[in-house]
Image (tube, helix red, strand yellow):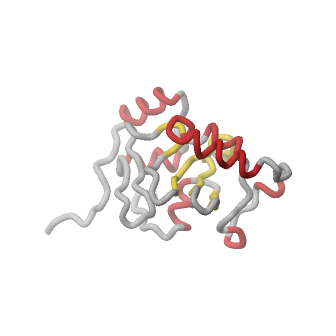
Amino acid sequence: MESEWLGYPGATEEQIVAAETRLGIILPPSYRTFLKITNGWPAVPGPNRLYSTEEINWFCAENQDWIDEWKAALKFIPPITDEQYLVYGEDCLWNQPIRTEYMQTALQISDEEDGSVVLLNPKIIHNYEWEAWLLINGRAGIFRCHCFQEMIQTMGMQSPWL
């Protein structure tokens, strides 16, 4: 009987540490766990192919144009307070408040699929976990979660690694 596993072989600790060294960071726990189980994830069943340790990179390195477009589009919007920004849950699944300055330091962990990308935000940390985003450029929408694990679960993906 063939395996039903859709993922890839897990990353070694050496591969994860090499990515962290290359990026100058320590990856958040749930994302590290994911990489140890599967070093990336095909686009099925999710909206994007999740990158391997060798592919993850800073969002600004590949998508500075997106950042510039978002900043220009939102430049007349008043700043968002922490109270407004730090709201999560079912009542605000899409078009949550965004701080474009966080895009400059976000880690891109997926390919771009139909104008959407999965990011981890190191500027907002909850219990050692970085905030996770599904950013949709074409319709200027964002879906934010406390962490990578919560995003995967909220999106209804089967997550044998979490």
In this picture, residue 4 sits left or right of residue 120? left
In depth, the one of 32 and 61 nearer the eye is: 61
Question: Which image quarter: residue 133?
Answer: bottom right
Q: Which quadrant would the N terminus be assigned to in this image? A: bottom left
Q: Residue at x 39, y 62 (%)?
A: 160
Q: Residue at x 64, y 55 (%)?
A: 146
Please, is residue 92 above or below residue 79 in the view? Answer: below
* Residue 123 horizontal/vertical position (percent): 68, 41
Q: Residue at x 39, y 67 (%)?
A: 45
* Residue 136 horizontal/vertical position (percent): 57, 58
Q: Residue at x 53, y 27 (%)?
A: 24
* Residue 129 horizontal/vertical position (percent): 60, 47
In depth, the one of 52 and 74 nearer the eye is: 74
* Residue 9 horizontal/vertical position (percent): 28, 49
In this picture, residue 12 sits left or right of residue 48? left
In this picture, residue 115 sits left or right of residue 105? left
